Image (cartoon, rainbow, N blue to C red):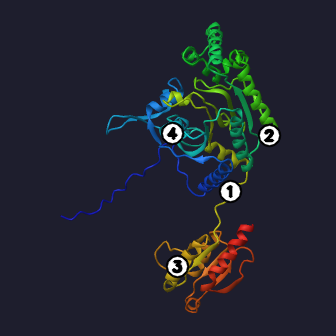
């Protein structure tokens, strides 16, 4: 019995809403940003760490907080069909980095400076600057207790913004002190909000005893006056905490970094301590926080490790790229050096070998390929060569190749100029080309 292929058209499939493709030419902007990050991290002696996208759910319940919106509403969690293990797509990566540091005993011989880039996942309604799959850059300094590391991390973020040419970004800082100071402040907050219970919205009432610091993050306009008059944590800091914060402020000023104190900048989890900070912009609407960080000296113990001081930050790359596109000229596609044109199939093998030799020397070379499988006309190939942005075309004519030569034609500077180049001298030409490019 013959089986004829079905003529029914299959339904087109689309990406999950809020999980977006990154395709050329946009991917060039991502590559340029990632290259800048890698260069800068190397200059600060931060080394790359790569953790799994899927982690035990318990890691985030402990490390991110049971009463946070992330854990309560936004995590992609599921049960492993193989063994019933509770797993979660990572919504952030600091807990994963600390888990890896404990598991591999990374700080046994001293502190470590680490960074990561990669996708995170949160189940929320997609909107501008907030997607279900988003990309985060993070820097973490593990095993260092001094305020100089708090400042180093802020300088690292600030320098990245400067190198990208971004403007109008403000640094806001605050201090959370230590646990006893936070507990005293927490009690004062609860007493204050209880005294004004009739003005609390449903979220604030739910958080009042579980996590009162989160009330200070409220975006409800009706509560702003009440929140603005709430007791400030800075009023509860002792001498050592104030000294740590004063050093942070003086070091930032010594490095010519502008800062302002935001007393409402807090973290609702007990493992945070001392410095917290955010880099914010008013040019992205409500999603104005580009980078947020702070000191989390208690997280190692919470995840089963030895007491280890630590500080770090996370940066949303989508927001950075959005600001970059608004403020800075668009990053062009990586330019080609050479486009190889092959008028007759007989020269294809020579052209392909030549392309490989050029690439081995660092030349960005593209060999023409036909969409139909037939040999395209010279006019069509030149049109493609010009559209590619290549600086030169190499034309593998049958007569020239038979004589061990190839035509070199300029497509940009001095467009139209051409000469014959011996095939066995192309390596020398390529070396000269690379040296001119590096000087530029």
- For label 1, the SS is loop
Q: Disc 3 to disc 2, how far (Cα)?
A: 53 Å
Nearest to the eye among marks 4 and 2: give it: 4
Asked if the residue at tag 1 contacts the one at tag 2, i.e. Cβ–Cβ closer than 8 Å, the answer is no
Residue on which disc 1 sits: 331
**C-alpha distance separating marks 1 and 4:** 41 Å
The residue labelled by disc 3 is 353
The residue under the point 69% across, 42% down is 157
Q: What residue is disc 4 on? A: 105
**Is 58 positioned to the left or the right of 35 in the image?**
left
Q: Do the residues labelled 3 and 2 touch (CB within 8 Å)?
A: no
Return the disc, 3 or 2, that comes first in the chain's sequence.
Answer: 2
Check the picture and name the quadrant holding the C terminus.
bottom right
Name the spot of residue 102 as percent of width and height, x first. Answer: 50, 36
Among the two numbered marks 1 and 4 on one chain, the one whose residue lies closer to the N terminus: 4
- Compared with 358, 23 (above or below) is above
Residue 280: mark: none
Residue that appears at 72% across and 30% down: 173
Q: Position of residue 44 (x, y in %)?
A: 68, 47
Q: Which of marks 3 and 1 is nearer the N terminus?
A: 1
**Which residue does the image show at 61% across and 44% down from the upper left?**
318
Which SS class for mark 2?
Answer: loop
- Label pair 4/2, CB-CB below 8 angstroms: no
Toward the viewer: 219 or 72? Answer: 72
Q: Distance between the residues labelled 4 and 2?
A: 34 Å
Which residue is more in the foreground, 329 or 296? Answer: 296
Q: Name the residue under label 2.
A: 255
Residue at 64% x, 63% y: name it: 334
Q: Which of marks 3 and 1 is in front?
A: 3
Sequence-wise first label, 4 or 3? 4
Of 55 and 120, the residue lying toward us: 55
């Amino acid at each position: 019995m013959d089986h004829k292929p079905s003529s029914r058209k299959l339904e087109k499939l689309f990406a999950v809403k809020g999980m977006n493709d990154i395709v050329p030419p946009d991917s060039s902007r991502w590559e340029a940003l990632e290259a800048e990050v890698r260069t800068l991290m190397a200059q600060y002696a931060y080394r790359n760490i790569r953790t799994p996208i899927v982690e035990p759910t318990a890691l985030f319940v402990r490390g991110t907080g049971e009463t946070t919106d992330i854990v309560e509403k936004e995590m992609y969690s599921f049960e492993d069909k193989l063994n019933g293990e509770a797993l979660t797509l990572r919504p952030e990566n600091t807990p994963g980095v600390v888990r890896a540091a404990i598991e591999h005993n990374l700080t046994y011989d001293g502190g470590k400076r680490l960074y990561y880039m990669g996708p995170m996942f949160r189940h929320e309604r997609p909107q501008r600057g907030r997607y279900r799959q988003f990309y985060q850059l993070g820097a973490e300094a593990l095993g260092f207790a001094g305020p100089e590391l708090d400042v180093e991390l802020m300088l690292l973020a600030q320098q990245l913004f400067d190198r990208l040419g971004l403007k109008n970004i403000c640094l806001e800082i605050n201090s959370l002190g230590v646990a006893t100071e936070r507990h005293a402040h927490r009690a004062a907050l609860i007493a204050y909000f209880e005294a004004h219970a009739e003005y609390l919205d449903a979220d604030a009432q739910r958080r009042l005893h579980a996590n009162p610091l989160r009330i200070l993050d409220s975006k409800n306009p009706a509560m702003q006056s009440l929140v603005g008059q709430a007791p400030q944590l800075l009023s509860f800091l002792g001498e050592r905490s104030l000294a740590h914060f004063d050093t942070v402020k003086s070091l930032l000023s010594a490095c010519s970094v502008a800062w302002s104190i935001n007393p409402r900048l807090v973290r609702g989890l007990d493992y945070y301590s001392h410095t917290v900070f955010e880099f914010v912009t008013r040019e992205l609407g409500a999603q104005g926080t580009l980078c947020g960080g702070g000191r989390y000296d208690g997280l190692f113990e919470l995840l089963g490790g030895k007491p280890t001081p630590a500080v770090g930050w996370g940066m949303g790359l989508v927001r950075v790229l959005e600001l970059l596109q608004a403020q800075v000229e668009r990053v062009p596609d990586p330019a080609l050096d050479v486009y190889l044109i092959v008028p007759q199939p007989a020269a294809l093998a020579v052209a392909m070998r030549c392309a490989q030799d050029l690439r081995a020397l660092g030349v960005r070379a593209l060999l023409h390929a036909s969409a139909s499988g037939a040999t395209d006309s010279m006019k069509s190939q030149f049109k493609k060569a010009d559209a590619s942005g290549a600086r030169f075309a190499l034309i593998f004519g049958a007569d020239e190749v038979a004589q061990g030569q190839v035509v070199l034609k300029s497509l940009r500077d001095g467009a139209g100029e051409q000469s014959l180049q011996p095939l066995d001298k192309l390596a020398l030409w390529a070396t000269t080309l690379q040296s001119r490019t590096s000087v530029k």
